[in-house]
Image: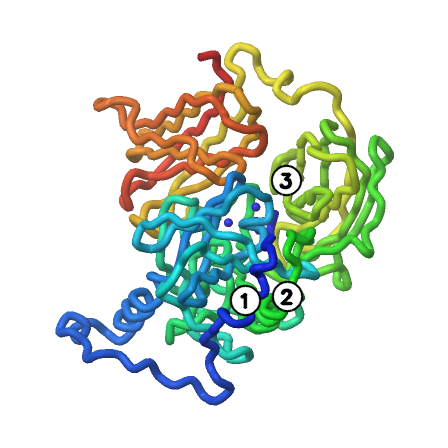
Amino acid sequence: MMNHIFLNHLTSGFLTLSTSLGLNIAPASAISPITEPEPSPILMALDLEEQTNIRVYEKASPAVVSIDTEKANGSGAIITDDGMVLTNAHVVSQGGQVEVTLADGRKMVADVVAYGENGLDLALLRIRNARNLPTIPIARPGSVRVGQRAFAIGNPFGQFQNTFTVGIVSRIDRERNLIQTDAAINPGNSGGPLLNSQGELIGVNTAIFTRGRGGGNIGIGFAISVDNVPPFLQAAKEGRAPRTAQQQRPIMFNNQDAKPLPVNGQEVRGVLAEGANVLPVDNSFYNLYTFEGEAGQRVIIDMMSDDFDSYLILLDIDGNELAQDDDGGDNTNARIDVTLPDTGTYTLLANSYQAGETGNYRLRLRTVAGDRRSELPSSDNVMLRSSGILDSDNASVLPSDGSLYREYSFDGEAGQSVRIDLTSSDFDTYLALFSPNGRLVGENDDISDADTNSRLTVTLPATGPYRVVVNAFDSTGRGQYLLTVREVSI
């Protein structure tokens, strides 16, 4: 995921939606407290925050589902007892059969009933032959306040169903109707509910802000505000909502004021200063550029500055993240080296790493002939080699067991065989590999009973960017490590 990652047909039966969509939306008056049975002695022994956490989870989690298609996975919230599910459009818009896994483990097929329009990343599903399902009520529009507690439930990384995280509403972007939260959200949480202390849906989790392509949660997540939900559901109810996927544009960017970036031309000189575009998630400045690219063309983009730490973000022709980089060039200069997937107009953000950084910079875009792997040493075919430190200052926390992890990515091809090694003399390593559609390809703890390093040897199932998760076996794991990805013959 770029700085803002997005951690993606019904017949005449659609008309029955108007009579079956019995939504539970809080009234405009003050929200009444939930009537609960007398707390058990165990709950009475817990503090009030713990009681709230447990109550919200036990009330809402039965109505949170995992969603899988052939190309993507995510989460969703059941909003009617006959099986209407609210999720993100980008979770289900790539086609194929939609399978929904309920909290109790049952797997059911669902149909896409409606999509949001004008870039609204929402979709409504109907689970086939569903009845008497648990539901999540929808909070009153306009009821969300900065500082209130926020709870997220979803299926991070497509394998930790009904993970529960807690935070607050950190910020409200009223212009884009986005809620910012520090409740941990990761890839796979897309489409899951953001909840208030009453267990009501206040948003649909849709994106995270992160540094580094494929990066994990760093405490800045985004949910589509509940203010958008009733109008979308009303449009679906009346048959006005699109029934096919709409082109999704990035929430944060458009290229209306972008400047042209010449291919294989002279360097472009620019300035980041007061008055430039501001990235809402971290208040850093950025300038926009566009260039024309061709499918299969390999490009190298350099951003160089003596005044600030450069940062580059490249969006594909559909406005989705293709690549980003912080220090891939010399020192704090940024470099993106990528093979373009399509022919069309690409958008580039010339950004700074931190808020408030200003100064002059230079941009250069050039094309390179040949496969990037041809430049790698033929002796070992290294595709990725990176050393790092796993500690609480630079790693994310896996909610399921409290262990630390960091993420890396590499470009792979269908049928290509790779060996991934994760070594450390400081902690017991754990390694996981995810495919371009977010599915788990393989994982490993120990190479052998006598070796706590990790190794995976796999044949890649698809072409695209793969995500490698560098993890510790348990929550105590800390220290230095070396990650290596090699192409091999098997």
Farthest residue toward the front? 12
Tell me the residue that label 1 is attached to. Answer: 17
Disc 3 crowd rating (10 Å Cα; few below 14, some 14-19, many 20+) is many
Badge 2 vs badge 1, beta-carbon distance below 8 Å: yes
Q: Quarter-wise, where is residue 306 in the image?
A: top right
Instruction: Choose the circle earlier in sequence order: 1 or 3.
Output: 1
Farthest residue toward the left? 41
Q: Nearer the viewer, mark 3 or mark 2?
A: 2
Badge 1 vs badge 3, beta-carbon distance below 8 Å: no
Residue at 45 percent of width and 88 percent of height: 30
Tell me the residue that label 2 is attached to. Answer: 239
Q: Tell whether 212 sits left or right of 258.
A: left
User: How far across and how far down the image is residue 237, in percent?
Assistant: 58, 69
User: How far across and how far down the image is residue 134, in percent?
Assistant: 35, 65
* Disc 2 element: loop
Q: Please say if 64 is above or below 149.
A: above
Residue at 62 percent of width and 50 percent of height: 353
Q: Which of marks 1 and 3 is in front?
A: 1
Can residue 356 be seen here? The reply is no
